[in-house]
């Protein structure tokens, strides 16, 4: 039997669950088990748990058949726990490094107490870490190693939580501790365990990192009558006190905590519906009067005044006192309004006038790559919209220096023009694969669709705070932009979990697949032949598409390969299609090589998807192109000559050298040998690609654009959309053909 059992209830945390479980499995202490309870989570959390359980036998997963809530989910895990001690960990929080070793050592050194209380720190999305303000209560040198609560009653002032303690399992059984249903389920467990324990110990160390999510994650911040559950929780506590005369000394302290708790619920904004406040106050008064201990002394100051109003059932007086606080909040709102008005003035009188006009329900504005082109996911959504909802006018925002590249027949407005400001002010729908400028106001009734433009290998969003060399962005400004999103389109569960964590806003994830990748499944052999003919590729030519990514430490696009030498060594029937990252401008080196006929510069080609179709294989480093290209089930070669530098500067979510979608080379010589020997498309490479596809090609089945249009623009519910076609039932676009034999000798053109 393990010494420690960690019970982890899981519900809608796919963006944080990997980090939580990794923090547990990465501990240097190993004598533990994890009981993970999937509380009928509607996202990919259950599948993530199963993946971890397959890899580590210490993880046991319980899939509940219905959503029962946090308390009863913990009970389900508690029933399966086998350890000597039980710990609880919320699935969006993490353990600090070495936490379990410290806990185990303290348990042993204090003679296995019934409860060990340890500390936590709050971690914020913007990088701040704040230790519990009452950490001084956990001083280990304040008395004996073990004690009852009577010796240190101030411990009741700690936050009423269960996940900062280790509980001996036989103690749990003896007291009969379980979690009740409803909100505030921690209160009965916390109070009853602490007042019942005869031997308590403390550990003055941060063991849990308590994530303060920017959006969601705390049901107690939800306006609901469910907050009335707090009364039933204290009913349970006082019923227990009534049944155990030996605990009567705790009536006064628990009564004080009850009154404080009721006042907190009343005073915190965003909890009680406005029309339920008086009812809650009167109910709190009834409990106060019924449970008031003899000789109870109210606390001094304002808190004591609130106790007195509660005892007198003086709701009008209490409401008047809180009105002062509301007036202060209103003054702050007015100040913010002045700031916002100043920003709107900066936008210009014309834009402000357009914002006052009604929304055009049949207008959609599209943009891609900071308005550089008509491309990517927005272009695929545009095409589907034209077919499924032709009544909606589609307009593209384009930079003035890029209007000459707009395809014929596409309606566009120049970025910054009067027509542009009118369009973004009045359009019902705004679709982008990055963000619209900060000056664009999200109006009530507008729908912003964030399609993204790749699966993240490199760190994104808030995770870039850990890698300051990768960006100088303002993360607060970034999240203000994210607050405009209504939908976030995703191509796989991995991406969904990352987007929800690094962009903590109130958008809904659309697990539809990437619209731009539809063609990689639906294209025909004729489409492939046409794509190759447009590039001038002769029959029998093997076309290798080379797509390196952007590097923050490299100015301008200089290929990291000696393309001329590579082309010579691969022979005359191999064509290298070279596409630089969109952050880089034209490359004079590529122009020279192209004029010599050794490579084709396709950096300005309007459709990367057609380049995918035309090519026989992909050579890339850390570009998200690998995830899209994998949908074709064609060979992929990773050329990672600077992996250590890139991963340190930018940060990555997995080791591409170990989890590559095919063969890996770290030098040009290795790459040349891979390509000439045939290893780049042998069985071993195909097996690696199959593993990669199972992980990252979840949703791209050819129907993504249709799903987005039908749900976002036509209002169809998600359950009515075409179901995702399983990966093994999909048929990718056909490959170009056999090409050259990989064992052909070197032939210099």
Image (cartoon, helix red, strand yellow):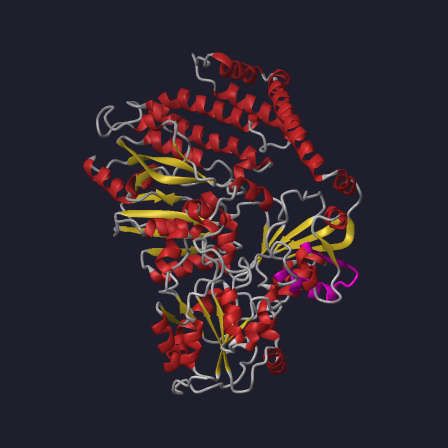
Answer whether residue 395 is magenta in the image. yes
- Answer above or below: position of 370 versus 279: below
In the image, taking residue 170 as reference, residue 675 lies left or right, namely: right
- Answer above or below: position of 179 versus 159: below
Q: Is residue 40 visible?
A: no
- What residue is drawn where x is 59% and y is 53%? 434
Pinpoint residue 564: horizontal percent, then vertical percent.
Answer: 44, 74
Pinpoint residue 231: horizontal percent, then vertical percent.
Answer: 52, 30
* Closer to the camera in the image, 405 or 143: 405
Answer whether residue 263 is magenta in the image. no
* Closer to the camera in the image, 639 or 21: 639
Pinpoint residue 506: horizontal percent, then vertical percent.
Answer: 58, 45
Q: Quadrant of residue 363?
A: bottom right
In the image, taking residue 547 as reference, residue 682 lies left or right, namely: left
- What residue is drawn where x is 75% and y is 60%? 411
Magenta-colored span? 377-400
Q: Is residue 306 visible?
A: yes
- Answer above or below: position of 314 versus 514: above
Q: Quadrant of residue 380?
A: bottom right
Pinpoint residue 342: horizontal percent, then vertical percent.
Answer: 68, 32
């Amino acid at each position: 039997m393990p010494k420690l059992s960690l019970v982890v209830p899981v519900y809608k945390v796919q963006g944080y669950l990997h980090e939580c479980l990794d923090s547990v499995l990465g501990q240097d202490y190993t004598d533990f088990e994890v009981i993970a309870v999937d509380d009928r989570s509607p996202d990919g959390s259950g599948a993530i748990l199963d993946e971890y359980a397959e890899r580590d036998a210490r993880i046991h997963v319980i899939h509940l058949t219905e959503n029962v809530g946090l308390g009863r989910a913990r009970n389900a895990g508690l029933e399966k726990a086998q350890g000597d001690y039980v710990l609880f960990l919320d699935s969006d929080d993490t353990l600090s490094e070495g936490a379990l070793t410290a806990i185990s050592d303290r348990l042993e050194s204090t003679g296995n107490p019934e409860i060990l209380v340890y500390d936590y720190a709050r971690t914020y999305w913007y990088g701040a870490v704040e230790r519990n303000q009452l950490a001084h209560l956990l001083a280990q040198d304040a008395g004996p190693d073990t004690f009852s609560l009577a010796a240190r009653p101030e411990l009741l002032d700690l936050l009423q939580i269960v996940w900062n303690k280790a509980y001996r399992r036989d103690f749990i059984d003896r007291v009969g501790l379980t979690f009740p249903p409803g909100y505030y389920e921690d209160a009965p467990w916390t109070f009853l365990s602490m007042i019942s324990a005869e031997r308590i110990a403390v550990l003055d160390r941060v063991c849990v990192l308590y994530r303060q999510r920017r959006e969601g994650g705390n049901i107690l911040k939800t306006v609901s009558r469910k907050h009335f559950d707090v009364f039933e929780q204290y009913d349970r506590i006082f019923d227990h006190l009534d049944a155990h005369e030996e605990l009567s000394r705790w009536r006064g302290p628990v009564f004080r905590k009850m009154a404080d708790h009721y006042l907190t619920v009343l005073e915190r904004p965003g909890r009680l519906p406005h029309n339920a406040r008086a009812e809650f106050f009167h109910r709190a008064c009834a409990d106060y009067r019924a449970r008031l201990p003899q000789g109870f002394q109210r606390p001094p100051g304002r808190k004591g005044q609130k106790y007195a109003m509660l005892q007198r059932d003086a709701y009008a007086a209490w409401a008047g006192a809180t009105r002062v606080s509301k007036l202060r909040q209103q003054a702050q709102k007015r100040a913010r309004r002045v700031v916002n008005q100043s920003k709107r003035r900066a936008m210009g009188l014309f834009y402000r006038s357009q914002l006052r006009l009604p929304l055009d329900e049949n207008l959609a504005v599209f943009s891609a790559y900071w308005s550089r082109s008509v491309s990517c996911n927005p272009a695929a959504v545009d095409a589907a919209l034209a077919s499924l909802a032709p009544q909606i006018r589609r307009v593209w925002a384009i930079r003035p220096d890029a209007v000459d590249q707009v395809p014929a027949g596409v309606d566009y407005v120049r970025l910054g023009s009067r027509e542009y400001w009118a369009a973004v002010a009045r359009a019902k729908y705004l679709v982008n694969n990055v963000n619209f400028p900060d000056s664009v106001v999200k109006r009530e009734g507008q729908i912003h669709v964030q399609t993204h433009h790749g699966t993240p290998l490199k760190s994104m969003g808030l995770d870039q705070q850990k890698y300051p060399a990768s960006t100088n962005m303002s993360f607060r400004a970034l999240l203000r932009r994210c607050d405009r999103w209504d939908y976030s389109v995703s191509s796989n569960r991995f991406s969904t979990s990352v987007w929800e964590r690094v962009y903590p806003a109130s958008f809904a994830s659309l697990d539809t697949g990437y619209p731009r990748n539809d063609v990689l499944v639906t294209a025909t052999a004729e489409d492939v032949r046409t794509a190759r003919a447009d590039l001038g590729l002769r029959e029998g030519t093997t076309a290798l598409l080379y797509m390196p990514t952007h590097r923050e430490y490299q100015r301008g696009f200089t290929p990291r390969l000696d393309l001329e030498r590579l082309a010579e060594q691969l022979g005359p029937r191999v064509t290298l299609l070279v596409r630089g990252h969109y952050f880089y401008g034209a490359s004079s080196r590529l122009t020279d090589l192209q004029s010599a006929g050794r490579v084709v510069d396709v950096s300005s080609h309007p459709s990367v998807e057609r380049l995918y179709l035309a090519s026989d294989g992909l050579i890339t480093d850390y570009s998200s192109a690998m995830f899209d290209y994998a949908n074709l089930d064609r060979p992929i070669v990773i050329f990672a000559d600077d992996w250590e530098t890139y991963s340190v500067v930018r940060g990555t979510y997995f080791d591409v050298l170990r989890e590559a979608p095919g063969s890996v080379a770290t030098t040009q010589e290795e790459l040349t040998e891979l390509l000439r020997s045939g290893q780049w498309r042998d069985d071993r490479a195909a097996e690696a690609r199959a593993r990669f596809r199972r992980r990252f090609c979840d949703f791209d089945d050819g129907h993504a654009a249709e799903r987005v249009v039908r749900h976002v623009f036509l209002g169809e519910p998600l359950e009515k959309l075409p179901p995702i076609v399983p990966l093994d039932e999909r048929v990718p676009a056909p490959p170009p053909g056999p090409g050259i034999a990989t064992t052909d000798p070197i032939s210099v053109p």
